[in-house]
Amino acid sequence: MNAAGLPNITYLSAVHQVDGERVALPNQFMSKTSRNLAENPRASLSLLDPVSFSEYRLAIRYERTDRRGPVFERLRDDVDKVAALAGMHDIFRLRSADVLHVEEIEVVYEAPRPVDDRAHDHSMMLAASAELASRMSRCADLESLIDVALAVLDDLLGHRHSSVMLLGEAGTRLFAIASHGFPYEGVGSEVEVGEGVAGAAADTAGR
Amino acid sequence: MDGEPVRVRLLVDADDATTLDNLQPNAPVAITAASVPNLSSVQLKGRVVHLQPVNEVDEAKRVQYSSDLTNDIHRTDGDQLAVIRPWSERSVVACIVEVEATFDQTPGPSAGAPLSAEPACDDRVYMRH
């Protein structure tokens, strides 16, 4: 809301928790929002849990803008991943990270999910990961190890589609050496580092 | 839409006491609407005229909008229908808003630019505010 009391609303791709009292918002196209925060530091943030779909409303107060540093870097990685998933790498670019103090949290919608479900899921994933490690340890060569790993990722962890890509000697391109679950094999396909989901992941890992 | 002045009929979460409390007659309001598959978005700004109980047409639209939203999120992001459905299906009340300005909010360089009276989105838009 600006100083005259006119509200402005915008979508954000993600919100990051900075510490126990603060969140950081990715500023990509928020010129109007930034002007309003300069005039009136109070804002309202509607948050949707992307897993459970529980919804929260946060009363927040603007504190600072980061254009470098760990908070900015974390948000930039996240924006790059969202851009890769949406195929909008040229459009989604982080200008800055706005850090705001959380003054109040209101539950707008609480998903009908038992409290201990998530702990149960984690327990199942841990057991599946142990089984994955066990089966991989019994493989005698790289080819069978990759085949087993991708099959177990599907069978026990539900990752129906997967591929393994290696970085080329020049360090600029990824090459697929195995894939699982796709209608085409995909072995030998190439991706530029920084391009698409796999390229963005490799780019992040290389920093 | 009613013609001049342009009015829209919002279907607002009936259990969201904070939002309903804010929607007093003549209160300024900003509304965003987006298409899940292609992210095209618009923002409407205006003033609340009044709240109304929903009628049969509203209820039919709520059912259709909830179904479209649920299916679009499922197809676009892969979330399970059983998780999305309870979130998207809520009881609603109607809020009449007189629109004073519309803006493009689609991600990209034109975000924030004023729009003409013609809507920029396709039919599948979901309004929250």
Image (spheres, helix red, strand yellow):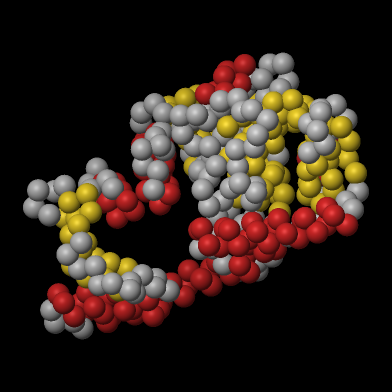
Q: B93 and B113: which one is in front? A: B113
Q: Where the C terminus of chain A falls, by quadrant?
A: top left
Find residue B52 and report its horizontal and vertical position in percent. 90, 44
Q: Is residue A194 left or right of residue A72?
A: left
* Residue in the picture at 78% in, 38% down: B1
* Residue in the picture at 83% in, 53% down: B58
A174 relative to A125, above or below: above
Answer yes or no: is residue A136 visible. no
Find residue B71 and report its horizontal and vertical position in percent. 60, 62
Q: Is residue A19 left or right of residue B64?
A: left
* Residue in the picture at 26% in, 79% down: A148
Q: Where the N terminus of chain A falls, by quadrant?
A: top right
* Residue in the picture at 56% in, 34% down: B105
In the rendered image, the residue lying farthest to the left is A169
Question: How many numbered circles does the render carry?
Answer: 0
Find residue B79 and report its horizontal and vertical position in percent. 54, 63
Find residue B23 and report its horizontal and vertical position in percent. 82, 35
A157 relative to B41, above or below: below
Q: Is residue B51 left or right of residue A25?
A: right
B105 relative to A123, above or below: above
Q: B53 and A203: which one is in front? A: B53
Answer yes or no: is residue B13 visible. yes
Q: A96 and A140: which one is in front? A: A96
